[in-house]
Image (spheres, coloured by chain):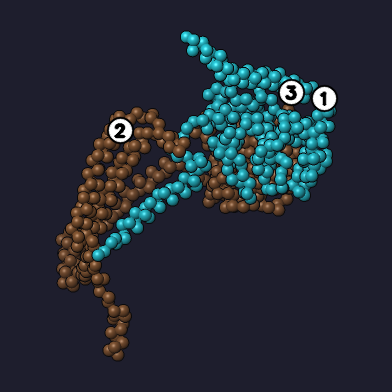
Chain colours: A brown, B cyan
Amino acid sequence: MNHHAAVEEHPVTDPGIEQHPPRQSDVDPAVADRAYRRIVGMLMAVPVLVVAFLVVYFAVPRDAELIVFGANLKMQTTLLGLSAGIAVLLVGMAAIVWARSLMTDEEIVDDRHELSSPPEVREQVLADIEQGIEETGIRRRKLIGSGMAGALGLLALPAVVSLADMGPWPTADLRAQTIEKTVWAEAMQLVNDVNHLPLKADEIQVGQLINAQPKALQDLHGTAYQQAKAKAAIIVVRMDPNTIRIPESRRDWQVDGILCYSKICTHVGCPISLWEQQTHHLLCPCHQSTFDLGNSGVVVFGPAARSLPQLPIMVDKDGYLVARSDFTVPVGPSYFERDSSKDFQDGDR
Amino acid sequence: MKRASGSRPMRRRKAARPVLLLLSLALVGVLYAAITPAAQSAAEGASNEQLVATGKQLFAVSCASCHGLNGEGFAQQGAPSLAGVGAAAVDFQVRTGRMPMTNPLVQAPRKDNTFTEDEIAAMAAFVASLGDGPGIPTEDQYDPTGVNAEGAARGGEMFRTNCSACHNFKGAGGALPLGVVAPSLQGVEPKEILEAMRTGPGQMPVFASGAIPDENVQEMIAYLQRVNATPSAGLTFGGIGPVAEGLWAWILGIGSLVLFAIWITTRGARS
């Protein structure tokens, strides 16, 4: 029994502190002196580098070039970085050499004391607190305590109410007018991005990709323009109608294989225009979500959960592409209140 | 005096050799200049029918094993029909060495072109005769030298909107799914850029003149040339984004920190 208890108390014999062999600098004064000179030498180089930094700062012109391996490193910033960087490095290296060769490296044991205070100290502290509460008189005049708590609690209300400044409450009506609506509308002309050229249906070739936007965007400016473009940006592609799947419900959403989709990824809203014309796959550069534009924009790879919204289009009397309506589902990434029942699912008719 | 006059014929003989060489070189140059335009005008003068006939023969030797004797294509082998691809497609594919392919890979890589200008023109004429398509562009369609700063800025906007998704905003190129690569556009001839946009080689979509007219293409090429002529500060690591930069930060930055940590903790020499 006794033996068993001893084993539990010390399962492994305490090996004690490892024997300390002396370093060369401990026994040979010449070695210690060399280390000493090295440390002082490194520290004395620091003022030289600091002076060099100041000289470079004032003397080297800002536009001076320094070509290294064909890369244009600016002369001044490179020299400033080198002088300051090496100076800091030398301070650190001097400290390490000092610790490694001159400071004592003998291991010592410093036993940790008991963490909890002795019982009499703890009792005294509790008694002091109790006495303090008693002396405030809050036990006899209780309304002071509840009044104070109520006053502090109500002071939080102005802070919480002012959060309303962050924006209008996103009710269903408001969402329908903002996040679920774009500037696309019936008969709105499709125009090319940047040069605003209208798109003539019979000029668009099979395999062609056009980054486009609604014509009405040209009338908007500043924040209104950016917000409208972020939702209304589209891509127009033309594919051979015989090589793609056009569901019955979307037969009149396209013009002879010219299809129009939202340019905003349904995952987190990156603009996408990386389209492979042979596979008809559209790839988002942010997280590699891939949509099949030859199959109503369904997701074929990646983290996106919903098909890319398709914009119904037709031609006007002059042969230019125009929208039939706004998007039928909200474009862009998901949000809590979004109704995703109308999104296109692979296999829908 | 006497010695000097005696050595004069020697000096004349010494000088005669390089002068003769220069003269003969000049003569060759003049003759060449006189002959080549004649050859070019002869090729232009050759009737289109002759050109198509020559092209058909060249096509039968170099292209027909995949695309068929009449360019009808062989879909199972991934060789598309060439009816309607136009002369520009042939000029682009052959000039950049992408066609003929040595074996049907995922993507035709750029390699040295082994055909002469006349042979390319003949094959292009033959393929153009199979169906309407974009013709070989002329220099006034793609030459970016007349573009001013405003045009280059607009070209930059067009490039970043239409091209940067695959080719990177400086045209450095990029990776696409399944081993396909969008090649670098740096140093690529303006003519080849316009031809590629109009014909849509491989997975690249077509960017036709209805949406992006030739002037805009010139501006986009001017942007590419200017942005790549502007020196970037510091080491660019190929300018392909955070992967290359991160790799060097890990190797050099973390690597040197590891070396310092090893130095700090080693115990050094003991006696």
Question: The disc labelled 1 sits on which kind of residue?
Answer: Ser
Q: Which chain is home to disc 2? A: A
Task: State the mark number for residue A57.
Answer: 2
Specify whether residue B209 is in view: yes
Residue A191 position within the rendered picture, expressed as x and y whole percent measured from the top left: 64, 31
- Depth check: A105 or B198 in front? A105
Mark 3 secondary-structure assignment: helix
Query: According to the image, label 1 marks what residue?
Result: B47
Give the mark toward the camera: 2 or 3.
3
Give the mark toward the camera: 2 or 1.
1
Residue A143 position within the rendered picture, expressed as x and y whole percent measured from the top left: 24, 57
The residue drawn where x is 31% and y is 60% is B265
What is the distance, in whole Å, between disc 3 and disc 1 at their CAs?
13 Å
Give the mark toward the camera: 3 or 1.
3
- Depth check: A122 or B264 in front? B264
The residue drawn where x is 51% and y is 30% is B229
Query: According to the image, label 3 marks what residue?
Result: B40
Question: The disc labelled 3 sits on which kind of residue?
Answer: Gln
- In the rendered image, residues at marks 2 and 1 fall on the same chain: no
Q: Residue furthest front?
A: B2
Question: The disc labelled 2 sits on which kind of residue?
Answer: Tyr
Mark 2 secondary-structure assignment: helix
